[in-house]
Image (spheres, rainbow, N blue to C red):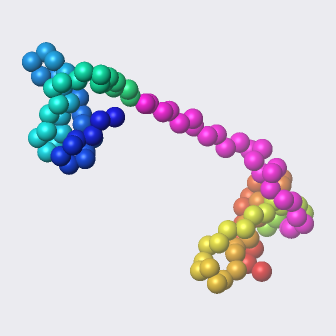
Amino acid sequence: MLFCPKCGSLLKPKQEKGKRILFCSCGFTKKDLEGAEIKETLNKQHKEIEVVSEDEDKMLPLMDANCPKCKHKKAYYWLVQTRAGDEPETKFLKCEKCKSTWRDYS
C-alpha cells in the first residue's frame, strides 16, 4: 500500500492515457510507478446460512413442569433478561411433547 506524501491518505489506482497511475483525493498523483506493484483484489465473503434445527431444544436443560396445553410433566427451559438489569430474569419453558412455549414468572 502506498500513501499520499501530502495528506497521508491511501493512494488509489486509475487509468490515464493508457497508463496506470496512483492518485489521491487531495490532488496528488504519482506517475512514476517503478518498483510499485498495483494489485486490485476483491474479497467476497459469503456467510453460510445458519439453520436452526428441532434438535436444538435437546441441548437445553429439562425440568419438571406441567404444560398448560397438553399437561405433559417435562419441559425445557432457558433464562432471558427481558427487564431492567436489577430485576430477575424471565424463565421460558417449552414442552418436551407438544413444543408449546410459555413464561414462568415465579
Q: Residue furthest front?
A: 35
Residue 53 magenta-highlighted: yes
Q: Is residue 65 above or below residue 36?
A: below
How many labels were placed on the picture? 0
| Region rendered in magenta | 43-66
Q: Is residue 92 above or below residue 96?
A: below
Residue 95, x across and y down, in percent: 80, 58
- Can residue 95 be seen from the camera position used here? no
Q: Main secondary structure of the magenta part?
A: loop
The quadrant of the picture occupied by the N terminus is top left
Residue 62, x across and y down, in percent: 86, 60
Q: Residue furthest top?
A: 18
The residue sitting at 14% across, 34% down in the picture is 29
Please state if 29 lies on the left or on the right of 80 as rendered: left
The residue sitting at 30% across, 22% down in the picture is 35
- Can residue 26 be seen from the camera position used here? yes
